[in-house]
Image: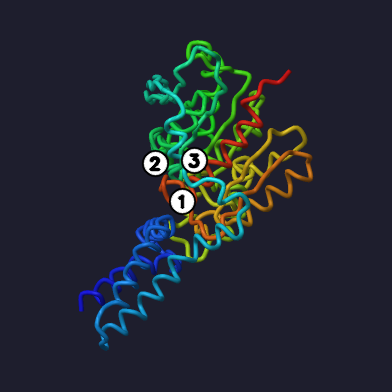
Amino acid sequence: MVLLGLSVALTLLSIWIVVPPWNRPSLIAAVISIECSPYLLLLNAGALVAILRAPRSGLRKAAAVLAVANLSLSALPPFLLFTQTKDAAATFSSLAAAQSRGALRETDIPVVLGQRRTAMHAYLPDSLRPAPIVAAVYGGAWRNGSPSNDAMLDRALAARGYAVFAFDYRHSPAVRFPSALEDVKAQLRFIERKASEYHADPNRIAIVGHSSGAELALLAAYGSDRAVRAVVSYSGPIDLAQAYRFPPHPDPIDVRAILRDYIGGAPSGSAERYRLASPIAYVRKGLPPTLLIYGARDHVVKIEAATALRDALESAGTKVTLIRLPWAEHAFENIPFGLHAPVVLYAVERFLDSAVKAKRS
């Protein structure tokens, strides 16, 4: 009876790996289950061994059937990652290793965005040598979030020698597009002016954004005259009008409502604003190298949007890489020691080292 109960409990954890999320709680459950699938795999394997060693009975047989099913579910994401993603096996310890690469100092930098007083958070290498800059823009459907959202990733990049500035921005629906973008651009100008005070190099700037923050990062990199050397998009929206017309199914966070809050209406009455808020509208020659990181199972931002941007950038002659994670959900990187985040960090580090860290002659 105990082993059957254990198998049922593990089923309730493992089933979210394959059940499409239909609301926010189910999306959170899916992200956790998928990212923790390696740990679930070990638990399910242990449960199966314990069941097979138990005395024979009808309950034992039922528990064994569930255990085999759970084992198969939890093996699916790791199997797909390691068989379909290049260099996935290169490092699973990359994040932990990055944490110990160098001493850091952290500080809040007061800024005023519109009429709102807030602060960006800086993660700085403990060195007097001018460091390349990473501007980090958090996600949260343009509605919520804070500069501390991605603290572990930001610390990992700072430990590798980058001066990381985690930006803040005003949220919808209190403000509409382009207010958040203006905030990001204002902070870019600020760190360019003040770079020397933080032993940072204003001529080597990259932007890393997550979800809605990735849309802002791409727009800031593509649509301004700032000297941005590279941009990384974790699951960022690409074509907002297209996303409104063809939302994901199921749609766990109500994409259309989020876009109406951000833009100020539907595409039928705000077509130009939707275009201006879409990174794909800015594709042209001379854009900075771009790294796109998207989950094929994303139920918030469809991976087809990333494919379209990659194709457009390639046609324009821009260096672009699309990392397609075969079983990752939206915001997978929120589980830093999960299945995908360490592998992706390894790719982000290599991309930034190539595009930003080396000084141009």
x 27%, y 88%: residue: 58
For label 2, count other residues whose C-alpha is less than 10 Å away and answer few (under 14), some (14-19) or many (20+): few
Residue 317 shown left or right of residue 194 in the figure: right
Q: Earlier in the sequence, mark 3 or mark 2?
A: 3
| Residue receiving disc 1 | 332
Residue 47 shown left or right of residue 30 in the figure: left
Residues 137 and 34: in front is 34
Tag 3 near tag 1, CB within 8 Å: no
How far apart marks 3 and 2 lie (CA) works out to 29 Å
Residues 20 and 43: in front is 43
| Residue receiving disc 3 | 94
| Residue receiving disc 2 | 144
Quadrant where the N terminus sits is bottom left
How far apart marks 3 and 1 lie (CA) works out to 16 Å
Tag 2 near tag 1, CB within 8 Å: no
Disc 3 is placed on an element classified as: helix
Residues 166 and 44: in front is 44
Give amino acid for label 2: Asn
In the rendered image, the vertical position of residue 274 relative to residue 16, given as above or below:
above
Nearer the camera: disc 3 or disc 1: 3
Nearer the camera: disc 3 or disc 2: 3
x 26%, y 77%: residue: 4
Give amino acid for label 3: Ser
In the rendered image, the vertical position of residue 177 relative to residue 125, given as above or below:
below
Residue 313 shown left or right of residue 192 in the figure: right
